[in-house]
Image (tube, grey):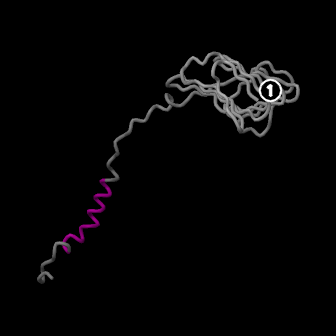
Amino acid sequence: MPPPGQRGYHEAVKPLVPILLAAVWLTACSSRAPERQVPDAARLDPIQRTASLTQIEGDVRVKRAGAPAWKVADEGMQLAINDKVRTLRNSFVTIRFEEGGVMRLEPESLVAVTDLTVERRNQVRRSAFTLMKGRVEAELDTLSQEGSEFKIKTPTAQAAVVHREVSFQ
């Protein structure tokens, strides 16, 4: 125990602890972390492409992404990701891709557009569809950009383009 009138080191520093903690906290809050170089989102985000409906024969319907109801398909109608197309009995439709190539839906088919993008950075094109019912045939222009792909999926299988033609049911 220190003699009367003399305080120990801990006793002398004790009243300063809240002040020191407040100073440390203020310094930490006011100091800025080094800014990270954030890539320009417009350069990295893929560009959404479209495909259009052509050669409509019979009763063909389109359900837009997030829409509650099916609409009658029109010649030239643009499709985007998550849209669905269905052909009813004795009906056909051709989907034409903006970079060339076509996919034909046979009668009583249902297909969903799952990807239609091109990467800004390297121009890799991705086209993917989910065939839920029926049959489709596709004839594509050559996929010139390395890494580009065209896929058709079903709940149990997947087909990818090797050359220029693919048929799947």
Residue 105 versus residue 37 in the image, above or below: above
Residue sitting at 32 percent across and 48 percent down? 31
**Which residues fall within the magenta stretch?**
11-27
Residue drawn 23% across and 71% down? 14
- Compared with 41, 138 (above or below) is above
Near-viewer residue (92 or 167): 167
User: In the depicted view, which residue is nearer to us: 111 or 59?
Assistant: 111
Q: How crowded is mark 1: few (under 14 residues within 10 Å), some or many (20 or more)?
A: many
Which quadrant is home to the C terminus? top right
User: Is residue 8 toward the left or the right of residue 23 in the image?
Assistant: left
Q: Name the residue under label 1.
A: 73
* Amino acid of disc 1: Ala
63 in relation to 125, above or below: below
Q: Where is residue 132 in the image (x, y as percent from the top left)?
A: 75, 35
Report the residue that reaches farthest toward the right. 90
User: Relative to 9, is 78 above or below?
Assistant: above
- Which image quarter: residue 128? top right
Point out the image quarter for the N terminus: bottom left
Residue 106 located within the stretch drawn in magenta = no
| Residue 26 on the magenta segment | yes
Mark 1 residue element = loop
Residue 33's x, y, as percent? 35, 45
- On the image, the x and y values in percent for residue 155 come to 71, 38
Quarter of the image where one finds residue 148: top right
100 left or right of 90?
left
Position of 31 compared to 104: left or right? left
- Residue 152 in percent (x, y) is at 68, 29
The number of discs equals 1
